[in-house]
Amino acid sequence: GSMGGHRARRGTTIDNGMAFDNLKDYQRVHSTKSNLLIHLVAVPLFVLSSVLWILSLLVGAVPGVIAWTATATIAVLLQRHGHRREPESPPEPEGTLASVRRWLVEQFVIFPWFVLSGGWLRQWRSAPPV
């Protein structure tokens, strides 16, 4: 792919920091209805709390920074719980920086694309009952 990325399906390029080479890999580790529901709530919660954390930091609102840090942490823990319920775990990137990068790409790019492209709904319909 371009700029050192891996070529994914449908012509998209995913950065090397992303552990999922294509949508099929992402779907494989987001296959249970419970995990899909957790992500549907927790990813927007993480994105919102991240934006509000930055805004709180910029205006010097220490209580906001603390509250949004706690909220983002809850969103991370919820997703970790969802991944533990999966038959297969997501691949772990090597190193802390790669893990953080993969996490942020999933939250801000991959999962929103997964939902908006209809992938989440297709995965929900094909998942076994809870």
Image (cartoon, rainbow, N blue to C red):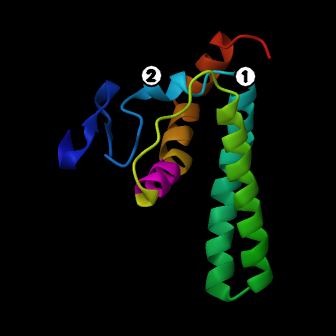
Q: How far apart are marks 2 and 1 (CA)?
A: 17 Å
Please name the residue shown 36% across and 32% down the image.
21
Against 20, residue 46 (above or below) is below
| Residue highlighted by disc 1 | 33
At a point 74% along the width and 32% down the height, the residue shown is: 37
Query: Disc 2 or 1, which lies upstream in sequence?
Result: 2
Residue pictured at 67% horizontal, 14% vertical: 127
Image coordinates for residue 51, horizontal then vertical, percent: 63, 66
Which amino acid type is shown beneath numbered disc 1?
Answer: Lys
Tell me if residue 99 is in the magenta stretch: yes
Where is residue 10 drawn, in percent x and y?
33, 25
Element assignment for label 1: helix
Tell me if residue 62 comes above or below residue 54 in the rendering: below
- Left or right of residue 1: residue 100: right
What count of labels does the image hold? Answer: 2
Q: Which amino acid does label 2 sit on?
A: Lys
Q: Is residue 82 left or right of residue 96?
A: right
- Whether residue 22 is in magenta: the answer is no
Q: Position of residue 123 (x, y in %)?
A: 61, 19
Magenta span: chief secondary structure: helix
**Residue 108 on image: x %, y %:** 53, 51
* Residue found 49% across the figure and 57% down from its top: 100
Quadrant assignment, res 130: top right
Specify the segment rendered in magenta.
98-105
Q: Is residue 40 visible?
A: no
Q: Is residue 89 left or right of residue 62?
A: left
- The quadrant in which the N terminus is found is top left
- Residue 97's tag is none
* SS assignment at label 2: helix
Q: How crowded is mark 2: few (under 14 residues within 10 Å), some or many (20 or more)?
A: few
Compared with 90, 80 (above or below) is below
Q: What residue sits right under mark 2 in the picture?
A: 24
